[in-house]
Amino acid sequence: MSEELVKAIADMEEEEAIRLVRDLLEKGVSPTVILDAARQAMDIIGQRYENCVYFLPELMLAGEIMSQIAELIKPRLAEAPEVRRLGKVLIGTVKGDIHDIGKNIVSFMLDANGFEVLDLGVDVPPQKFVEAVRDFQPQVVGLSGFLTLAYDSMKETIQALEAAGLRDRVKVIIGGGSVDEHVRAYTGADAFGRDAVTGVSLAKKWVGAQ
Amino acid sequence: MNHQLSPDEQREALWQGKLSPKDPQGNPLAFQSPEAEKKYKERVLRVKAAIEMETLPDQVPVTIFPSMFPWKYAGMTVYEAMYDYEKCAAAFKKFVLDFDPDIQWGAYAPGPGRFFEILDYKLYSWPGHGVAPECCYQCNEGEYMKPEEYDALIQDPTGYFIHLYLPRVFGALSGFQMLPFFPGILEMYGLALTFIPFGLPPVQATFQALFEAGAEALKWVAPIGGLDTELATLGYPSLLGGFTKAPFDVIGDTLRGTKGIMLDLYRRPEKVLKAMEVLTPLMIQMGVNSARATGNPLIFIPLHKGADGFLSDEQFRKFYWPTLKEVILGLIEGGCVPLPAAEGGYSSRLEVVKDLPRGKTLWMIDLTDMADAKRTIGQNACLMGNVPSSLLNLGTPEEVRAYVKRLIEVAGKDGGLIVSNGSFFDEAKPENVKAMVEAAREYGVY
């Protein structure tokens, strides 16, 4: 039945997936089994996104299904089970920019691919990135921005990391809007990505996975 | 406009109107010099020929369609551009004169800051209201329309906007919630009861705010709109007649929001389709009315949630394109020239959107490969773009010149090209913007 659940989630059958979770819980199946199934489904969804079978509607619906499942099993879960993670990624939209669709997709895909993601939200000042790098200790920092103004904010953020002596501890990737090699060189980032798939594969490379 | 005329005749009448421009009093426009008049007319004809693709223009037209760049170039903050209307107009005039584009798009982008304050506009953050003074205004995405409200929108879009949507996005229009049901105003008996809301303080406060907002809009449009006339007398035509949107974006941008509409494609696809069907004639009307009011043929259609990566091919063909195509064809039928702007990448959509009547549409291309665009939509439509914002911002004049040269080789050989930036930009090196214009003039002679 947990195979059915994997299939229902991966195939975007929202109602069926939720019904199956309720059934499993009623039958006394352990929440970790359900979480495992959900994780497997996320893998499939991530692969389908990478293969251009799934797009935004599926990522967003998958996010909704996952949070409903999390709500359902929360009462049965004494403690979140330890999930082995590939690594940590800190992400946020830089100062002065409040666009977040692209950033959210990247966060979702990183999470689906096994990263622990800390999302600082939008309009994040350089100092906040610095503090989060210090506290969260990510291997990768993702800076997002849609406006041309974001180029300068990205540059400032990377300079702030340098000033704080943290630049060498992280790899920085930029993404969003019109970023390209020009912008990467200007900001001092390690790489740029035009889509979430590029972001995920770079992050994997950097943490030494696959 | 004479409704007996065919769509092509209506469109030709708009172009002829542009070629014999009038001042706001309706008299023939007094150009500042014979050279300015000559330039103005050459430019209108140049762009017209590029769009219609029947004869080659004398040269590849070039334009700059910026966001806040003109005001940054003037050393102003966006805040100043939004709050000092005279300065806003003066800065834009200097931008046009300094960079010398073939067509100009007006100083309307900043908009009147005070006006948004009066209405307590919540849909956007602007300098001093959620973003810093030097930042462009930005949309606050949200679920301004609830999922269960599709039926209300479908049944009566105007009523939905008045009673539910507008009070949510304008704090000062909360009184609209109390307005009567207008189709109920039918007979003498009981009529006064229907009008009671207009006597109540919240409704009166809303109307007070509307009067103030209207007055502020007039105060703003005097210098900003007046500048269009002045720039015309100096040889710079404006062709922008207004804007409209793809029905999918109407719902996905500012009603349901990105997440809302994406979920709706699974949870209530029939409602989305029905709502778009209802919105389609309204979006056509919005563009056609605006072109007729301004006498300008181009109707801008910024395309958002159908770009590469947002939807699958199947979803694009089912949900995005049919009603957008209807809007484009409806605008053409109404004598306008639709200007869809394929923001972001559109590579995966080119085959789907390429079949439109020849010489009637102008596509603005952002990041899509121009050779691909030319091979597909470019066979039937003029292309405008695609000099990257990143290049204008961070490249060198030499790189910009090389880019424009290649752009003309790839997409401009047989006409059907207007050189321009591909996406809206705030920051750029002035020498790069200048290089774009100069290179188009140098390499774009037919």
Image (cartoon, coloured by chain):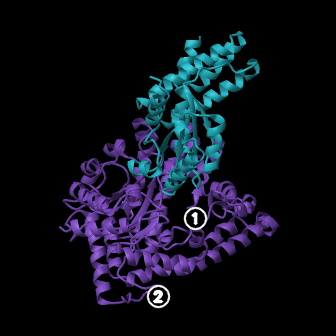
Chain colours: A cyan, B purple
Q: Earlier in the sequence, mark 1 or mark 2?
A: 2
Answer left or right for B191 relative to B369.
Answer: right
Front-lying residue, B361 or B156: B361
Q: Is residue B270 above or below residue B97?
A: above
- What secondary structure is marked by label 2? loop
Q: Is residue B387 left or right of residue A46?
A: left
Q: Is residue B166 above or below residue B204?
A: above
Q: Position of residue B393 (x, y in %)?
A: 42, 59
Residue at 38% across, 85% down: B233
Amino acid type at mark 1:
Glu
For mark 1, what is the residue? B134
The chain that hosts pointer 2 is B
- Specify the quadrant that holds the C terminus of chain A: top left
C-alpha span from label 1 to label 2: 37 Å
**Res. B187 image quadrant:** bottom right
Let me know if marks 1 and 2 both belong to one chain: yes
Category of crowding for the residue at label 2, using alpha-carbon neighbours closer than 10 angstroms: few (below 14), some (14–19), many (at least 20): few
Q: Which mark is residue B25?
A: 2
